[in-house]
Amino acid sequence: MDFSAVSSALKTIGELTQEVTSLWGVDEQVEGLASELRWMQSFLKVADARKVDNELIRTSVVEIRELAYDAEDVIEMFSLKVASKRKGGFSNCIKRSCCAEACEREKILY
């Protein structure tokens, strides 16, 4: 089964600090989302271990993947909003993000 979307969303949630979520009053929502994603990940692992292959399971896997991508998008937008408020606005946030991506690409190339 494809665990990557759920794992990626959980990683993104893990990168949010408790301080940020508490300051913005979203700590309960973030923990609830993380809990739901862990449940989805468990479902995928059980379905994979049992080699279950039917239409309901395939549909559920597709829906879980899409929900995980949506969750990750929301978390990333929230992180951008927080970063833009904390360190000089949105343009500085974009510059830092682009610089980080460029550094990562260079690591891959070398």
Image (spheres, rainbow, N blue to C red):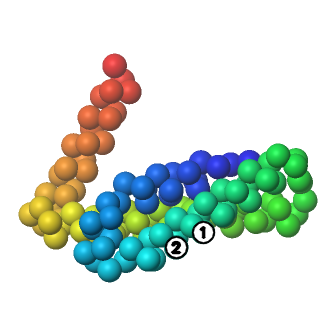
Q: Residue at x 78, y 65 (%)?
A: 59
- Is 68 left or right of 12, judged from the image as shown? right
Q: The disc labelled 1 sits on which kind of residue?
A: Glu
Inspect this view and state whether residue 70 appears: no
Q: Is residue 44 left or right of residue 22?
A: right
Q: Is residue 88 left or right of residue 22?
A: left
Q: Is residue 80 above or below residue 14?
A: below
Q: Which one is in front, 61 or 50?
A: 50
Residue 58 horizontal/vertical position (percent):
81, 60
Calculate the distance from the C-alpha at mark 2 to the C-alpha at mark 1.
6 Å
Q: Position of residue 44 (x, y in %)?
A: 73, 55
Is 16 or 66 nearer to us in this picture?
A: 16
| Horizontal and vertical percent position of residue 76 | 37, 62
Q: Is residue 106 visible?
A: yes
Q: Residues within 10 Å of mark 1 (few under 14, many from 20)?
A: some
Q: Is residue 24 above or below residue 35?
A: below
> To which residue does mark 2 refer?
32
Quadrant occupied by the C terminus = top left
Q: Residue at x 89, y 53 (%)?
A: 52
Residue 4 coordinates in the image, percent (x, y): 59, 48
Residue type at mark 2 is Gly
Return the residue nearer the eye: 15 or 103.
15
Residue lying at 66% horizontally and 64% vertically, measured from the top left: 39
The residue carrying mark 1 is 36
* Circles 2, 1 touching at the beta carbon (< 8 Å): yes
In the rendered image, which quarter is residue 100 located in? top left
**Above or below for 72 versus 30:** above
